[in-house]
Image (cartoon, rainbow, N blue to C red):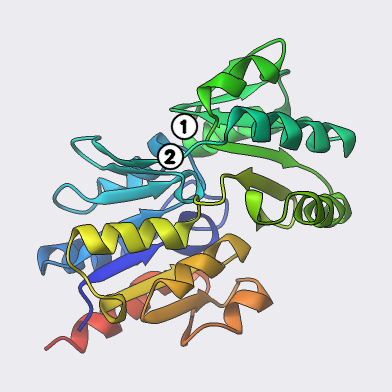
Amino acid sequence: MIRMIATDLDGTLLAPGGLSMPERNRAALEKAASLGVRVVICTGRLFAGGRRYALTAPGDQPVICVNGAVVRMSRSETYLRRVGLEPGLAREALDRFRAAGAKPWFYVGDVCFAEESSDALDALKRRTGASVELVPDLAAKYGERPEKLLALLTPQQVEALHGDLTARFGPRLYVTRSSERQIEALAPQANKGLALAMVARRFGVAREEIAAFGDNYNDLELFRAAGIRVAMENGARELKEQADIIAPPNGEGGVGQIVERLLAQRR
């Protein structure tokens, strides 16, 4: 019996463009929460960008954000988890991002820090509600243990940088992609799967009682922490190969359709 639903946002729960949630998804998650099922938003966004959708479910629900580096409760805003990059590791990783020609950003607390404005930053603010601050040099933020280092590049540059970071840092750094153009680096203990396992233990939910929904590479670890793995039809091939269920596309309320089916099996 399903007792927890963990769902990614962009490309999964949200409609294409990441600005709204299909009504079918909202209604299904609200019904699930009313039946005592924990609804856990799992996103690479900052807390504000995940919380706005977690609040559509009744009660104080866990929000896994910044790809698992941060877990907070939706209404009380209490921290359950916060894992940042060690200052030295942040410096080394930032150097590699810059060597690849990237103009990276740091996520620290509730803020995205960047060295210069861009259309991409403006889009981030519009789409996720993120707070953005410009600083002369991101190096000034090493001591604050940034939760995430990220950059937007061409798919070819992302592939090359991913290979470079993996070869240089190995298990010292968690490197992932939330789209073919976005690469992210976090502490090795920071991923959606480890965060979901922690949340499940806290609320007494077994792995086989969790249904996880995702669409991209950063949801692979999420799947490992769940008993039922649901990939979106519009998702990455690698994720769909690991799925138990393929949901209709995010533009068709695919999450809601599968949640309805899972809830019906509880009767």
Q: Quadrant of the rendered structure where residue 124 is?
A: top right
Is residue 14 visible to us here? Answer: no
Task: Find numbered disc 2 in the image and state the secondary structure of the residue it sits on.
Answer: helix
Q: In this rendered view, identify the residue nearer to me: 126 or 224.
A: 224
Q: Earlier in the sequence, mark 1 or mark 2?
A: 2
Q: Amino acid at mark 1?
A: Gly
Q: Is residue 72 left or right of residue 235?
A: left
What percent of the width, then of the height, locates residue 18?
52, 50
What percent of the width, then of the height, locates residue 173?
65, 49
Q: Amino acid at mark 2?
A: Gly
What percent of the width, then of the height, locates residue 57?
21, 54
Q: Residue at x 59, y 80 (%)?
A: 240
**Residue with the mark numbered 2:** 49
Q: Quadrant of the C terminus?
A: bottom left
Q: Quadrant of the rendered structure where residue 133 is?
A: top right
Tell me if residue 210 comes above or below residue 193 in the rendering: below
Density class for disc 1 (Cα within 10 Å; few <14, some 14-19, many ≥20) is some
Q: Is residue 189 left or right of residue 137?
A: left
What percent of the width, then of the height, locates residue 226?
38, 75
Q: Residue at x 25, y 35 (%)?
A: 77
Whether residues under marks 1 and 2 lie with C-beta atoms below 8 angstroms apart, the answer is: yes
**Residue with the mark numbered 1:** 129
Tell me if residue 162 comes above or below residue 259 in the rendering: above
